[in-house]
Structure formats: C-alpha cells, structure tokens
Image (spheres, rainbow, N blue to C red):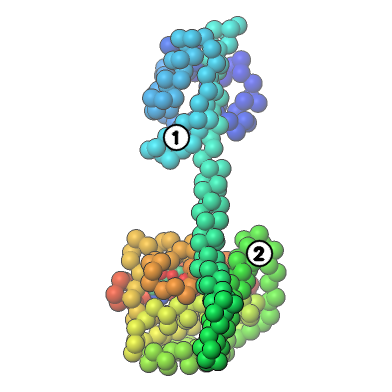
Amino acid sequence: MSDSGFPYLLSLIEDGIFVLDQRHEIHYMNDAAARIFGFSVARDRNPTFIEVVRDYECDALVKQCVDTGDAQSASIKIREKKQYLDIKVSPDAESRNYIVIVKDLTEKRHLEEIRRDFISNVSHEFRTPISSIKLLSETLIDSPPKDPVVHKDFLLKINLEADKLAHMTNELTELSMMENKEARLNKNSLNLNSLVRQVVQRLEAQSAKKSLVLSLDIEPPVPDLVIDQYRIEQVLLNLVYNAIKFTGHGGFITISVKKRDNEIMVSVSDTGIGIPREELPRIFERFYKVNKARDDEGVGLGLAISRHIVASHGGKIWAESEEGKGSTFFFTLPLGA
Ligand code: ADP
C-alpha cells in the first residue's frame, strides 16, 4: 500500500480517501481515512476495505459499486463508535479502481444535537411561568376576586412568575456571553476572605429559615487575588445557595478557603441529599438537573455559568458527593493571574 503516484496533497485533505480494486483491496488510503477508522497497524500486505472500516454497511456499498459499475453514496451511522459518516464510492474507468470518499460528520451532528436539546430545554423552562401568568391574568380579567387580599395575591403570583422569566433570561444571556467569550472580566485585586464573609452574610437569613449551621473555615491570611468581584461572588452565591437548597433542616454547611501551591482553593460542603455518582459528571452542563421534579425553582444554569466564570479566571471547578450524605463543591483560582 504505497502512496506513489498519489499526490502528497491527498494526505492534507480532511476527508478520508481510499483507492481500492474490485477485490476491495486497498491500494491507497490517506491519513484522514486511517484516523476516521482508527487504523494504524502496519502490514506487509494491502488490507481489505472491511479490515479497515470494520462495518458491513460500508463494505456493502463498495460491493454495490463494483457489481453495478455505478457510483454509490450513503449516510452511515457506525453504532459501536457513535460515528456519522457520509460515504461515496465511484468507479474510476481509467485505472479500473474504485475511489471511496468518507466525510466524518460526527462532530457536526453532535453540535446539532446539543443545539436541539438546548432549544427544547429553553422552551420547556419558559412554558411553565408563561402558562401561569396567562391563567392568573385571565382569571383577573374574566372573574376578578372580590376580596382585595385575594386580588393582590393573584398580582403577587404574576409578579413572581415574571421575575422567574426575567431571571432565566438574564442567566441565558450571561451564559451565552461567557460561551462566546464576549463577557469582559472586570478584574481588581481583592481579598477572597472578605468576599466569602459577605456572601455568607447575604445568605444567613435563608439558611436560618432551615435551621442550617453555616460555618467558615478560613485560613488566614490568604494573599489577595486579581479577580472579577461580581462574577466570583456569583459563583460563591450559586454554590452556597445550592448547598442551602439541597440540605435538609438542621444540616451543616462549611465554606473553606485555603492556599495550595500557586492557587487558592475554595470549597463548599453540605450534609444534604448528595448527588448520585453517575450524575456527577453531568451537573455542570447547562440545564442539567439531577431530578427535574425535585425542585421547581432552579433551571440548572447556575453551575454551567459558574464553570465558565471559574475557567475564564484560569481555575477549575468540580464536585465530590455521596448520595444521602452530602456534597462538596471545589473551585480554584490561580494566584498572580
Ligand atoms: P439549579 O439552578 O437547578 O440549582 P445548578 O446548575 O446550580 O442548577 O445545579 C444543577 C443541579 O445539580 C441541581 O439541579 C441539583 O440537581 C444538583 N446540585 C447542585 N448543587 C447541589 C448540592 N449542593 N447538593 C445536591 N445536588 C446539587
């Protein structure tokens, strides 16, 4: 299987290219073809097409072309590798060989899937508050309650649903800006310990409502960091707020700040419901909620936004958890960034 007679140019092309004879023996394949099918074994004889592609549908297409003498094309999904390929086999009358061109559409299809899921998630999350607003306002128009207290209660509910919509829109805008790297960081030198204390103060009332014990484990003195205060505060608020939301009455939440080598590590741990092991890698995806029915308040964007914020500061975010025992969320921020 030599490439003599075939220009070097072919090895630069992103589509896979094979030249076969009528016995399906490969006389040439470019680098992209080998990469698409994960073929790297050097042999002393020309491999056959099926040996490289290991898919009967692909091989059948070549057979059809050899049998009929007509060009054949198909979109093929290789299940085992979750690959989407567009394949075209054409006879070359002059050399009596067959040319196979393979386009790998896997990445493109994957992005299309993400986009589709995203749109259906957005519409789903918007539908509930919109239908509540519609129902409540229709009642006010058609049969307004006589009691002014009930009347006001309706208006408050409408207001609350509108707030939810505004909150979701803000989060979506924020996320899309972070993903498009449009969000400019407004960095200043800042002491993280005082930021953590402020966040805890802001959420004390909420944790008191559930009789949670919020404690701080701060290593003094941690060096100042150059960070965007508003955004890092957002990450802390998201993590501590989640800890409050997912921890039952009387539980414990501990926020710690520690210096490790060239970074500061913050952790927020709770004694709450925890996260099943198999779900853990997915919680930072946008709209991901462990149990959609478990809480109807969040939309699953908080951690996706937090991940972007931390990454844009050059840090990392991750979680450890045991179902029924609690979770710990960690994030790091590099010193001197
Ligand atoms: P949400 O706005 O729904 O809280 P997040 O992106 O902040 O969205 O979190 C995604 C999901 O991760 C949550 O819906 C929840 O299922 C899970 N989760 C996050 N933090 C915790 C925690 N401290 N304990 C248990 N589950 C959590």
Q: Quadrant of residue 274?
A: bottom left
Q: Gap between marks 2 and 1, in whole Å?
A: 34 Å
> Between 52 and 258, which is closer to the camera in this rendering?
52
> Between 333 and 140, which is closer to the camera in this rendering?
140
Q: What residue type is labelled 2?
A: Met
Q: Please give the residue where the numbered disc 1 appears in the rendered image.
A: 77
Q: Which amino acid does label 1 sit on?
A: Lys
Instruction: Identify the residue at image location x=50%, y=26%.
Output: 74
Q: Quadrant of the C terminus?
A: bottom right
Q: Can residue 335 be seen in this view?
A: no
Instruction: Identify the residue at image location x=54%, y=37%.
Output: 105
Q: In this view, does 203 lie above or below 180?
A: below
Q: Position of residue 158 (x, y in %)?
A: 56, 79
Q: Please give the residue where the numbered disc 2 appears in the rendered image.
A: 177
Task: Give the mark nearest the N terminus, 2 or 1.
Answer: 1
Please indicate whether residue 292 sits to the left or right of residue 237 in the image.
Answer: left
For the residues bearing labels 2 and 1, Cβ distance under 8 angstroms = no
Instruction: Identify the residue at image location x=45%, y=15%.
Output: 64
Q: Where is residue 134 in the image (x, y as percent from the top left)?
A: 56, 71
